[in-house]
Amino acid sequence: MWEKTVVKPYTTSLYPTFLKYESKNCPFCQNSIIHKHGKINNIERYKCTSCNKTFTFQKKLNPSDIWKDYSQGKQTYKELSIKYQCSVKTIQRYIDKAPKTALNSPISTYLILLWIPLSLGENLGV
């Protein structure tokens, strides 16, 4: 009547990575007991039960990556906003705050020429 079926544990190749369980901790005190604390601008907020601080798990932008893509990659504000999933105004603020001089000047390479004068009579077949 009923057949016994074996259920295999899921593999990550069959499921997207967002289905994996990841433990979330408070970024301030590393406490693992946190509670949802509402939404602001469609971003979930959390509250730590230990230190009573509220926070989000939204990914932070790296200003040096944005500046590198803008200056070396020659990308527009709109392209950068799509890439980093934020507004054009946010990208503009990051670029306006960036220093206008190079942070790490490239190591210049020198070509050293060694000139050995030959006497006119040597090795010229004279």
Image: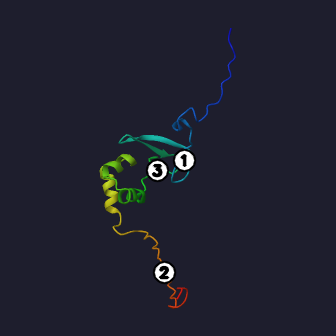
Closer-to-camera residue (105/64): 105
Marks 1 and 3, the one that precedes in the sequence:
1
Instruction: Identify the mark at residue 7; answer none if there is no mark.
Output: none
Q: x, y percentage for residue 104? A: 44, 69
Determine which quarter of the picture holds residue 92.
Answer: bottom left
Q: Residue at x 55, y 89 (%)?
A: 122
Would you call the spot at circle 3 few (<14 residues within 10 Å), some (14-19), or many (20 or more)? Answer: some
Q: Amino acid at mark 1?
A: Asn
Q: Of helix, strand and loop, which one carries label 3?
A: loop
Image-based side of 91 in relation to 56, left or right: left
Q: Which residue is mark 3?
A: 53
Q: Amino acid under label 3? A: Lys
Residue shown at 49%/41% (left/top)? 35
Chosen colour scheme: rainbow
- Residue 57 lies, with reference to residue 97, above or below; the image says above
Which label sits on residue 113?
2
Place of residue 93 in the rendered image (x, y in percent of width and height, measured from the top left): 32, 57
Q: CA distance from mark 1 to mark 3?
A: 12 Å
**Which residue is painted at 53% across and 49% down in the image?**
50
Q: Position of residue 100 (x, y in %)?
A: 33, 67
15 lies above or below 44:
above
Question: Within the image, what quadrant is residue 45 found in?
Answer: top left
Left or right: residue 94 versus residue 49 is left
Q: Which residue is mark 1?
A: 25
Three-letter code, disc 2: Leu
